[in-house]
Image: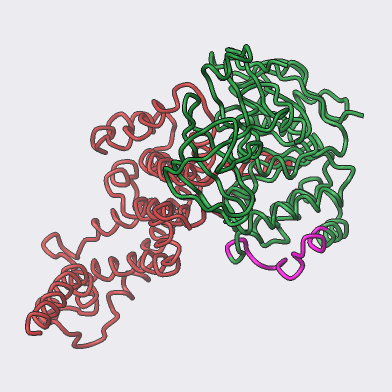
Amino acid sequence: MAAVDLINVSKSYGSVEVLRDINLSLQKGEFVVFVGPSGCGKSTLLRMIAGLEDVTSGELRIANEPMNDVLPAKRGISMVFQSYALYPHMSVFENMAFGLEQAKLSKAEIIERVHEAAEMLQLTPLLKRKPKQLSGGQRQRVAIGRAITRDPRVFLFDEPLSNLDAALRVDTRLEIKALHERLPETTMIYVTHDQVEAMTLADRIVVLSDGRVEQIGTPMELYNKPASKFVAGFIGSPKMNFLTGALAESHGAQTYGIRPEHITISDSKGDWQGRVILREELGSDTFVHVAVEGIGKVNVRVAGSYEIGASETVFLSPQPGNAHYFDASGQPIA
Amino acid sequence: MKLDILKRLGFYALVTIIVLQALFPFYYAILTSLEDGQALFEINYLPEALNFINYQSMLSGGVFGKQILNSVFVASVVVIISLTLAVTAAYALSRIRFRGRGLLLLTILSVSMFPQIAVLAGLFEVIRWLGLFNSLWALVFSYMIFTLPFTVWVLTTFMRNLPIEIEEAAIMDGASSLTIIRRVFLPLMWPAMVTTGLLAFIHAWNEFLFALTFLSTDGQRTVPVAIAMISGRSEFEIPWGNIMAASVIVTLPLVALVLIFQRKIVSGLTAGAVKG
């Protein structure tokens, strides 16, 4: 059964169209990530599902019921905001209970639900604190807890990790993943501009660009079979190498794409010859930027460390079968 | 080293001058209010006797008590109505997009720029037409002309600085607009409300011109006018003792209010300057 359906949904502010004809169908219990560069409309799409923005045209359905004109609180959804948006004057308990009070639940039930959520998120010792007495990660957990208590059908996350530091971001990412496994009935929609978050969390990823859906698919589908040059460049880190010129034309394409991890490097023989421009060492990997004669700049990913000085000569061989070809409009050529 | 001492001396000298300039008039009023008869006209800077006869005669003699109550009533009602209207107006002006919002805000501000005397005559007609002449509601009505623009502006600016996501979270939680104002905004806005409320109170408490024009009988007057109209036994005698005693009495409530809300005022005045 579909949990959320978007049928020809568009959004415009005055004459500016920010989303055009979005068609999506999300399954119950699915973890879907909306990803795209800033300004692509992903947050607007999420806010339309939440009911914080009107749907200009098209239809939004949640659990097969039309939702275009239903109040946000009546849609069976919860949202976690980027800035957490906790009520600063209320304790953690009151923050988590506020929505339940508005829904006119009994005192006993409110207490039970809040404690249940607090237990799940290890917030029980913090229930009496005010948000300003909490660390960033704890605030984030309270925001998630507030969303859980409402027992939603659909869980919305609007870039929930972008205010956390790098180490905490990885931990919280894992917690969200674990939360999804504990709530298998709940559909989760997650907005981010970070493709690593998208790849690690999603069952399916929706790549948006300039108000349109570029591609919908599992992380591996997007990685292996990008439906456009944009998706190919956006998914995967570091970015895919795009090469134009004679090499691409020999395959009848405008652009030849090869991921840095799909190139073998050697100091004695290979298909392409070039000189090292720059080397970035990450410990687990080394990125070698090479200027290849007649082809252009190519970034190569080597596992482990790779000792080589600048302007030394190296040989590169693209792995057969992993190259992508795109025509002038960015469409893939099979 | 020597320069340091000089700097410090200069600093404290300046502080002393400022404090003296601010407090001496009030101190001298207290001093005068404690003197009677001929002692009034002798210059002294320290209290020589604690003589409460002026206070006694002000508080027991007739309508002054009633006049204080008039002032309390007018100032309190002005504050309550102003804040209620201003909070709801600020919500609309800061959070709801509508055509002409900027123009409306500017209009509100420009209203408070009119000199009182410019609107006095017209306002007098309005108040007579409303049948409010010599009623305390005439003052409530006319004071709002000055307190509302100010409170609306301050609260609008303050509300704009509250993160919009908090409001959206409350909407997601199912709170109505009134619940959002009452349960989410009001608790966050207390400092701003206290500060603007207090300034509105002080304005209403001290206002003279409208109070003089719109009220005609002693029993209806508010204290600033009442004090100005205190007269002696003959037209050649100005009862300085009584006037000073009355002035001290009407200043005390303001001092008390400021002391009570001191902390809130400080945080209200600096609110929005730094992210908390």
Q: Quadrant of residue B106?
A: top left
Of residues A18 and A147, the one nearer the viewer is: A18
Is A3 inside the magenta-drawn segment? no
Task: Say how many tags the image has.
Answer: 0
Q: Residue at x 70, y 31 (%)?
A: A51
Q: Quadrant of residue A249?
A: top right
Instruction: State the residue lying farthest toward the right.
Output: A1
Where B229 falls versus B56 (above or below)?
above
Q: Residue at x 28, y 49 (%)?
A: B208
| Residue nearer the viewer, B258 or A280 | A280
- Can residue A43 be seen here? The reply is no
Residue ranking furthest to the bottom: B48
| Residue A254 left/right relative to B194 | right
Residues rendered magenta in the picture: A117-132
**Residue A247 place in picture, x, y as percent:** 56, 19
The quadrant of the image that shows the N terminus of chain B is bottom left
Residue ID at (60%, 22%)? A256
Res A81 → quadrant: top right
Q: Position of residue B238 (x, y in %)?
A: 15, 64
Chain B tint as drawn: red
Would you say A316 lies left or right of A50 here?
Answer: left
Q: Nearer the viewer, residue B20 or A294?
A: A294
Q: Relative to B10, does residue A12 appear above or below in the rendering?
A: above
Q: Please indicate, yes or no, whether residue A111 appears anywhere in the rendered image.
A: yes
The tint of chain A in the picture is green
Spot occupied by residue A18 in the image (x, y as percentages of width and height): 59, 21
**Type of colouring:** by chain
Residue B28 in the image, given as x and y percentages of width and height: 18, 74
A118 in the magenta segment: yes
